[in-house]
Image: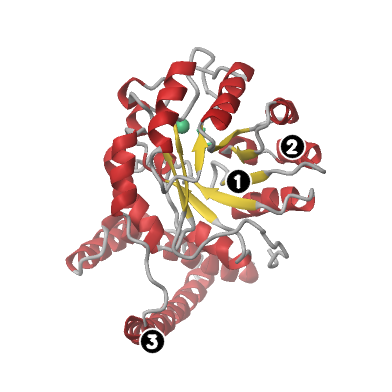
Amino acid sequence: MEDIAILSKWKIKKKKPIIIAGPCSVESREQLEATAFEIKKIAEVDFFRAGAWKSRTRKSSFEGKGEEAIQWLSEIQQKFSIAVCTEIASPKHLEICLKHGISNFWIGSRTVASPFSVKDISEALRGVKAKIMVKNPMNPDIELWTGAIERIYKAGICEIAAVHRGFFTYNKSNYRNEPLWQIPIELKRRIPSLPIICDVSHLCGKKEMISETAQWAMDLEMNGLMIESHIEAEKALPDARQQISPNDLRILLKNIQIPVKKRVKLQAQLNRLRLEIDETDRLLLQQLAQRMEIIKRMGEIKAENNISILQMERWKKILSERIEIGENLGIDKSFLFSLLQLIHEESIKIQAKINRKKE
Ligand code: PEP
Ligand code: MN
């Protein structure tokens, strides 16, 4: 997709990430107030978050308190003078929030996956003054994510940000949602003015991984963090495993290190390493091209002699041998597996093309 002319007016300070914290969901007035009371004391926090409508797979799960929750959230906004934000998934949700004086929103990842819903919300946002955060869709589709941001921006919302909350994968993973960091990085390349906030809670799915992942997000120059925090985290209705106490949140934010961009000496050292990387990549690509050439020659022979392209035994051997070599060189096994699969797929495509030409 071509680069997109979006100029987000959401102001970001260089050394101050945008911090959004609060419970996954509004569960009761007491829970909300007690959590907000503690979070308000943490100076780094810019927005207090809590969901009122929860999109759940099963009807039997907690689906949120709806308008009642928005009413309490609005009271919190006034009482603690803290900007609150919540999720909207439909024009109706937007209308209810605006009625109660709430105007900072995120659009959840299930909603972003549906262009129909995004279109409806965008139309309802026309002429509204609001800050909107667009979460990535559940599936790793950058076009869908970019498209949603574009629709909302074109509806006249200039204070717009993206939230990276990881992607659903069928594979087993340590994360609840696979980070696939290259996707938010590509989004930033396409829309440089767009702040990207990392929702480490939905990404990790468990509290033990949150500080480390938050630091990693900062090292990758993300512009903010969304962290779920609950006064009685272990008793939370949804997402109990990933919510941290306000005290743990305070400690996390105190310890987080914001990378300094322009330390000259460091910059020079990094630039030297970048040059080494450039050269290594060039060699890597040359080797890859050479491998493709060999594949083409093999494809010709197979096509002439009517030999099938996929040789399962050979593929199994390549996989196990290369993984062993790679692992001995200190390369991660699952990375090797994905890389070899990708190379193998491309080799098959090349040979299939040759084969079709011969027919
Ligand atoms: C949330 O932030 O509470 C939420 C449900 O997020 P997501 O849409 O990322 O799952
Ligand atoms: Mn949640």
Residue 124 falls left or right of residue 49: right
From mark 3 to mark 2, how far is it between C-alphas?
46 Å
Asked if one can make out residue 53 in the rendered structure from this viewpoint, the answer is no
Secondary structure at numbered mark 1 = strand
N-terminal of the two: label 1 or label 3?
A: 1
- Residue at point 26% right, 40% down? 208
What's under tag 1, amino acid-wise?
Met
What's under tag 3, amino acid-wise?
Leu
Task: Find residue 275 and name its label.
Answer: 3
From mark 2 to mark 1, how far is it between C-alphas?
13 Å
Identify whether 197 is placed above or below 354: above
Task: Find residue 133 and name its label.
Answer: 1
Q: Is residue 166 or residue 34 the one in the foreground?
A: 34
From mark 1 to mark 3, how far is it between C-alphas?
36 Å
- Residue at point 33% right, 23% down? 232
**Picture coordinates of residue 9 (x, y %)?**
67, 58
Q: Is mark 3 within 8 Å of ligand 1?
A: no
- Residue at point 32% right, 85% down? 265
What's under tag 2, amino acid-wise?
Ile
**Picture coordinates of residue 39 (x, y %)?**
40, 36
- Residue at point 56% right, 57% down? 195
User: Dot 2 corresponds to which residue?
Assistant: 121
Asked if one can make out residue 80 in the rendered structure from this viewpoint, the answer is yes
Residue 231 falls left or right of residue 348: left
Q: Is mark 2 within 8 Å of ligand 1?
A: no
